[in-house]
Amino acid sequence: LKIVCGAPNVAAGQMVVVAVIGTKLYDGDKEFVIKKSKIRGEESFGMICAEDEIGVGASHDGIIVLPADTPVGLPAAEYYKVETDHVLEVDITPNRVDATSHYGVARDLAAYLQQRGTPVALQRPSTEAFSIDDPSPAIPIESVDSKGCPRYSGLTIRGVTVRESPEWLRRRLTAIGLRPINNVVDVTNYVLHELGQPLHAFDAAKIAGSRIQVRTMPAGTPFTTLDGIERTLTADDLMICDAEKPMCIGGVFGGLDSGVTASTTDVFLESACFNPTWIRRTARRFGLSTDASFRFERGLDPNGTIEVLKRAALLIREVAGGRITGEIQDVYPNKVEPYAVDITYRKIDETIGQTIPPETVKSILRSLEIEIAHETPEGLSLRVPVYRIDVRRDVDVIEDILRIYGYNNVAFDDRVQSTLSYRTPTDRSQRLESLISEQLCGAGFHEIMNNSLTRRANYEGLATMPADACVTLMNPLSADLNVMRQTLLFGGLQTIAHNINHKQRNLRFFEFGNCYMRRAEGQSAEADTPLKGFEEEHRLGLWLSGTRTENSWLHADEQTSVYELKAYVENILRRVGVDEKKTVRRTFTNEIYSSGMTIETAAGRTLATFGIVDRRIARQADIDTEVSFAELSWTALMKETRRATTVFSEIPKFPEVRRDLALLVDTAVTFAQIEQTAAETDRKL
């Protein structure tokens, strides 16, 4: 058989593994078929395989060289004693941490099959053979932070031989996507996926002072994890330490200098239950997601640590030798009891809509390892295992019963009962929002919705909206989302910049949204402010940019202006019922508006602010064109305005007569002053 091979260790006369033409191999999830090919001008009729190419190892340094006495033509599956097996991929919802193990899935499957009459026996791995081989003192657990670690158990095994795991163990780990490391570490991974309880093995010789402490470290402490990366700890990170140094980020990731290596002879085996909140916080901060942290941050049963330790110790003794030394060390100050739930048969039947026999209910509960503590003709008192974090109420138990009983076994009733629903009236603010939205859409605006979180950098250097007035997040997702917005302006500018970058320059946007700010000490608070020292205000923002019309010869170069925006603002105020004669208008300039105006009530409450956005602000958002922006305080409008009513009047009997009046006034006199003077002189004017 002619095969072209460029591996560095290929030599004449070797016994090798060959994939002939037609053989299907896999590269990750991709399947490929060996075909006849031409390599360097020579025809090749197959491929000599490396370990990773046929799934028997991770090495790709060279081809597999078999012993010289290996029979020619022997199928590789027979040589490697490959067992035929099936790998199931199970999608688990976040509340079902009890099903993140082979035993957990098997428990549900057994309950389901038993309910359908299939004789299935669920057998948990036995630990009856566990015994102490050496009464010498074990490594003690000196102290445990019980808030971060409700239970910490440990076991010492001395005299182990660290080597490659046996074939059966490597094969099973490889089948579920894990890379075999050595027999001790492989056992911890195996038991993790078998029973769902994470374990960690320490080299006992590297535990300074021969004692374990579970505690936090001072902020800024450096720690190098197994991946070789040095990480800086905070005072909130729970660490597994010896007498001198941290050895492991509890429940998340091991340390580089305390793990099991080929030279390890003594092992300290850890089985613990950590606070889910602490684990989730640390894992997110370091960007680490491990099989252990995945389970710990969802909540595990502290009552299972000892049994899992025994199971792992028996397997380590089987594959690595060694002596189980001393008693199991266990710190469990506050025992967690099973959850008590009372349920009635009537509630089960009413919820499901069908009568399920009590014996069937009890059979399902027992198959799910839910203990029946007390029984009456009306119902049951149950003790729910701690590992079932999703079962706390009677309706949770009913869901479990129905899940095993089968949704498809619930018959549909001939009649469907329903209650008549009625539409609850919306409040005035919502109705006016809908009305103004329709009005703006009719004027060519598009509604946008931006994130209420933004960058603190947007407010640095602004006197009008200082950065110190921002409501800062304690745990921001990123530096770009570290404060809550004080204004709708910056979100709209980002939207405009995005559209300009996509060749859309004629833009009209509006947005309803809340803005948040810290209130200065001594500043008066609104009556409905929920938190002392903070303000929340509902606002409406309008943005104009580009030309007034598109595809028009007559107005091709006519740009939108702040006066057009002013007209939209006045129309909105008029529509919600603002009496313009009772408002005061003031012009201004600041670091946000190069030219602006406010519309206020006589009492000084600002209803609207609008103007031309300062070019410096626009350039910071990568906008090279003029932008007009208006921001209306919707909260203030709802407090100040009366309910708008439609007033009908008869059609005029006579045609309208217009008279033009030209007045020469000082530039300091505003139109509002002229209008007010005319109204005071004669209302008909």
Image (cartoon, rainbow, N blue to C red):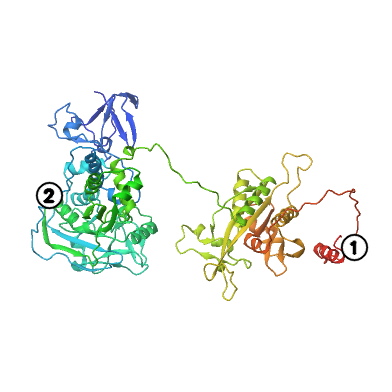
Above or below, 583 against 82 in this view is: below
**Which of pointers 2 and 1 indicates the residue nearer the eye?**
1
Residue 286 occupies which quadrant of the picture?
bottom left
Above or below, 232 against 58 in this view is: below
Which secondary structure lies at badge 2? helix
Q: Which residue is mark 2?
A: 318
Q: How many marks?
A: 2
Q: Quadrant of the N terminus?
A: top left
Residue 93: percent from left, percent from top: 35, 47
Crowding at dot 2, Cα within 10 Å, few <14 / some 14-19 / many 20+, comes out as: few
Question: Is 324 left or right of 174, judged from the image as shown?
Answer: left
Question: Does residue 105 appear in this view?
Answer: yes
Crowding at dot 1, Cα within 10 Å, few <14 / some 14-19 / many 20+, comes out as: few
Q: Which residue is mark 1?
A: 664
Label drawn at residue 391: none
Residue 523: percent from left, percent from top: 59, 74
Question: Does residue 15 appear in this view?
Answer: no
Above or below, 188 against 516 in this view is: above
Which secondary structure lies at badge 1? loop
**Observer-nearest residue: 143 or 21?**
143
Residue 149 occupies which quadrant of the picture?
bottom left
N-term mark: 2 or 1: 2
